Image (spheres, coloured by chain):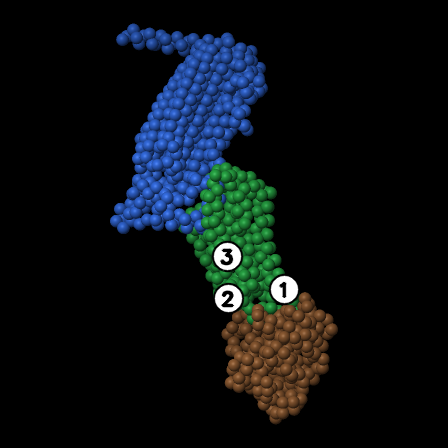
Chain colours: A blue, B green, C brown
Amino acid sequence: MRTTIFLITLLFTAAVIKAATITVCPDCECSSIGQAIESANAGDEVLIKSGLYQEGNILVDKALRLRGEGWPVIDGENETEVITVTASGVTIEGLVVRNVGTSYLEDRAGIRMQRARNFIIRNNRLENTFFGVYLEHCSDGLVSGNLIEGQAEEEMSSGNAIHLWYCKRMQVEENEVRGHRDGIYFEFVDDSRIRNNTSEDNLRYGLHFMFSNDDDYSRNTFRRNGAGVAVMFSRNINMWENRFEYNWGRAAYGLLLKEIYDAEIRNNTFLENTIGVYVEGSTRIRYRHNEFNRNGWALKMSGGCLDNIVNENNFLHNTFDLSLNSAPNNNSFDGNFWSDYNGYDLGRDGVGDVPYHPVKLFNYVVNRTPEAMVLLRSLFVSLLNFSEKVSPSLTPANVADNAPFMQKLNFSKDKPAY
Amino acid sequence: MFKILKYSFYDLSRSRWIYIYGAFYLLLTASLLWLGGGVSKAIISLMNIILVLVPLIATMFGVMYYYNSREFTELLLAQPIRRSHIFFGQYLGVASSLAISLLLGVGLPFVLYGIFTSPEIWNFSVLLLVGFFLSFIFSAVAFFIALRNENRIKGFGLAILVWLFFAVIYDGLFLLALSLFSDYPLETFAIGASMFNPIDLSRILILLKLDISALMGYTGAVIQKFLGTMMGMACSLGVLLLWAVLPAWGIKRVAVRKDF
Amino acid sequence: MITIENLQKSFGKQAVLKGISLEFARPGITAILGPNGSGKTTLIKSILGMALPEKGRIRFQGKDIRGGWAYRRQIDYLPQIARFPENLTVRELLRMIRDLRGGQPDANRLIRLFALEPYLDKRLGALSGGTRQKANIVQALMYDSPVVILDEPTSGLDPVAMIRLKELLREEKEKGKHILVTTHIMSFVEEMADEVVFLLEGHIHFQGGLKELKEKYNAASLERAIANILQEGKLGFKANGHGAKAARLVLKAL
């Protein structure tokens, strides 16, 4: 026991003693970051002072701490990747990384991590970097507080802001990303967490999530992205307290779920999306305490959705609350609040006495003949919906909320379970 | 003509109905804004009501005004005034007092609610503009019908039928045609068919402003491409104008040939 | 002043005027008489351009009136039914007519003449039939036009107003105006008219002075003369199978 303590103390002091700081500034003895890294030893800090460094292809191959002071600018001049890290235990913070330049042949990035562990990328600003932060085969890293802005114009010629590929136990937190192809991209990433990020104005997805299991994303805001958030081919994903807003366009949605099993979607807000949640072939998804406000379709399910439970959500002023284009398979829609519901509650228990049918006849018509949408909100369509409501003939009678709430549900008091 | 317009307008401005009409909108808009919550929602609810009610009231009111002022019209006909001016003056008097009732009834609450500082101002303007057009179009249609039918009952019946046709039946046939030919590309048909009904055209104009086009998928994109641009907007307003001019031209044609 | 050549007019299948030629050349009061449906009002409306003739021509001061409107400035017209926009007051109505016709009408004299002062600010809809007719007379006669057309001017008038109207018309006649009147009151015709035009079934049955009419039909009074006209040929009523009874009814109506 004693020897262990002694050894640890020794190691610690050794590290402190050995750790040196190498200062880089335009007028210093060492004016190049690459040069400073070369001369540094693992465990050292490279302190980069304010100034413009026109350097690309900076390779970090040992455990260093790169720290910027007064926002030094590293400019790739649209020619090269800027920082490539191949070692573990690296910290990069306080840098402005700029101008990586578009490449159709390689995925150049502002900061790339290859097979690294235990790293921190914190409080950097990445501007016009094609791919912003690119992580491949990494684990146990933190990407936090970065501002990543691009000027993406076309999907083909743009990269992702934060790109993770084959990673484990990652934390992506409090970043602000915009103007890329995808805001945050996860492919084969497990046991990771995405929290408190803002991803907006990206061409394709605010968050693109594929083949990744046991992950959790929460308290993020996804706003005005081309299509919204896509979560595909993944298992055990928790999605809570996110905001999906203003993803508005022909093929846009707040959230796309495709081939997802066993997920929890709770306490999210879906505001003014063309489609709030678009579900394709997903099973055992539980929707709880979400608010669907002023979406075109709040929930659109197609292609074999099984055993989904939609319970205790608020559906407020959506053009269509629900659209199903296949037979309802064991999905439950009981116990929600629907602003379009106009039943009564004689027992005064807060639950309406007549079921609510969230699928409208016009919705059924539109699924068959999309052009019929030009008749949206016409008197004829209102009459059509009304007559269908009085005596259902075409809409599935068993898709119903048998216990609809009379009042809008208040979620503010309940605590998230995580 | 402007003298006639002035007197018709003056006459109508003392009629109870025009105030009831205005007060109805005032009450409705105010309650939608303050009780329903939100400009955007109020605009959508108002749209539903305006698209049905403005044509209905304009048609009924136009027919009613024509029949009720027959003797007055005869008095005017004996005066040294051009015939077409008499009817245009009366028609414009009816249409503009309806339009002004709408403007005040809907406009005042919105102004008090602070529409001028709201980003929804354009949607609101389109709504009012469309309401104006519908007032003029349907009172012209009403005058045309009334001029052609001496029999009040027949005139009223026909006017209601015309309203019913544009408000409901047309869309029913439209939908029927769409579902019968759903195997064919129908975007052009959908645009074309909505041009032939001023109520449909008005509705689509507002919906485009409210961005419902995103819900329409491919059709929406085609329509947006056609109507969403300045050019398309001008074009559809032109069609609406044509819709107002055609029955007005009909009024003139019938008026100069009619015996009183 | 006004020349009518072969005027024909029908409403639907019913021929109302079947070729009428008339001339109003000399100033004075001409009474247009005839049973109901004989085409009196249609004739007047044709002159005013309100009914459009199928055939024939109407000239006003030598000019064809077809398509014209300015000639109506020379005509004062009193319509048959005094129903004006109900929401206007008498004052507003008179102002409006002045506004529409222009010129300088003399309404004040007529208003005093018919004692309309207390009603000037009353809505027309609130007035009695007689008062409304007085307002009607004022609006028609406040101008000083060479032609005056009166359609049933006496309806609803009390005796005093009736006397005033007659005085007024005499004055107008003195000014050398052409005055056309339709009426059912025979005493009014006998007292006022210089000339009578009798319309029957769309034709002019008689045109001439009162005296001539009485002489021609061998009657002491106008009423008798008209009865004689109607009985003379039984006048198509035969064809309808009503005969003398119908003629009596017509007389009553006259």
Q: Position of residue C162 (x, y in %)?
A: 58, 85
Q: Position of residue A303 (x, y in %)?
A: 38, 32
Q: Residue at x 56, y 41 (%)?
A: B226
**Who comes first in sequence, dot 1 or dot 2?**
2
What residue is pinned by disc 3? B162
Q: Position of residue B80 (x, y in %)?
A: 66, 69
Q: Residue at x 47, y 20 (%)?
A: A134
What residue is pinned by disc 1? B256
| Chain for disc number 3 | B
**Of C252 and B230, which appears nearest the observer?**
C252
**Of C47 and A87, which appears nearest the observer?**
C47
Q: Residue at x 56, y 63 (%)?
A: B148
What residue is pinned by disc 2? B152
Q: Position of residue C187 (x, y in %)?
A: 59, 88
Looking at numbered disc 3 in the image, what kind of residue is underneath it?
Answer: Val
Residue A49 appearing in the image: no
Q: Which mark is residue C114?
A: none
Residue C201 vertical placement versus A67 (above, below):
below
Looking at numbered disc 1 in the image, what kind of residue is underneath it?
Answer: Val
Quadrant of the rendered image containing residue C37: bottom right
Q: Is residue C174 left or right of residue B17?
A: right
The quadrant of the rendering that contains the C terminus of chain B is: bottom right
Residue C213 vertical placement versus A184 (above, below):
below
Rounded to the nearest angstrom, the CA distance separating label 1 from label 3 is 24 Å
Q: Residue at x 60, y 80 (%)?
A: C200
Name the secondary structure under disc 1. helix
Name the secondary structure under disc 3. helix
| Chain for disc number 2 | B
